[in-house]
Image: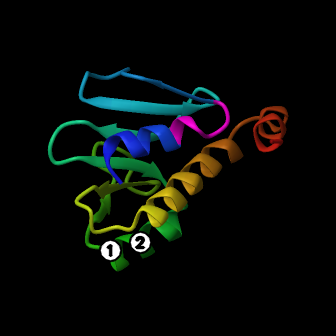
Amino acid sequence: MNLEEIREYCLGKKGVTEGFPFDESTLVFKVGGKMFALLNLENPHSVNLKCDPEKAVILREQYPEVLPGYHMNKKYWNTVMLDGSIPAGLIREWIDHSWDEVVKSLPLYRQKDLWNK
């Protein structure tokens, strides 16, 4: 997936906002005011995604392009290098997982609103 495809996919999820809270090279996607994806717009391109801690370790062991989250809590975040080697379907699955992980941390009334489609 390229940067624009990832951006469009993230924005297609319910309740998502985007912005540049840190600098012009990091596009941040939030749900319920909490970050679930950070897209590095500079080379090399990458995306940081929130992840269940056990799954995060498994993905790092399985894919050399998945690294501990750059400038993030490495227990919960992975950095996925966007070099074209990870299939688009997997990246979408990981984005979905990240969105779900963040939504699970929101108050119940917000969760119900976001999960009702």
Where is residue 96 drawn, in percent x and y? 58, 53
- Mark 1 residue type: Tyr
Asked which secondary structure carries label 1, the reply is loop
Q: Provide residue 17's location: percent of width, then percent of height.
A: 54, 26
For label 2, the crowd category at 10 Å Cα-Cα, with few meaning under 14, some 14 to 19 and many 20 or more, is: some
The magenta stretch spans which residues?
10-15
| Residue hosting label 2 | 59
Decide which of 77, 29 is in the foreground and name it.
Answer: 29
**Image-based side of 36 in relation to 110, left or right:** left
Say which residue appears at 32% left-offset and 59% top-offset: 68
The numbered mark at residue 23 is none
Q: Is residue 87 above or below residue 15?
A: below
User: Label 2's element?
Assistant: helix
Q: Give, as a three-letter code, the residue at label 2.
A: Leu
Report x, y in % for residue 86: 34, 67
Magenta region's main secondary structure? Answer: loop
Residue 69 falls inside the magenta stretch? no
Which quadrant holds the C terminus?
A: top right
| Apparent side of residue 19 relative to residue 30 in the rendered image (left or right) | left
The structure residue drawn at horizontal position 41% and vertical position 71%, both measured from the top left corner, is 59
Q: Which residue is mark 1?
A: 63
Along the line of sight, the residue nearer the viewer: 39 or 105: 39
User: In this rendering, is residue 106 above or below 92?
Assistant: above
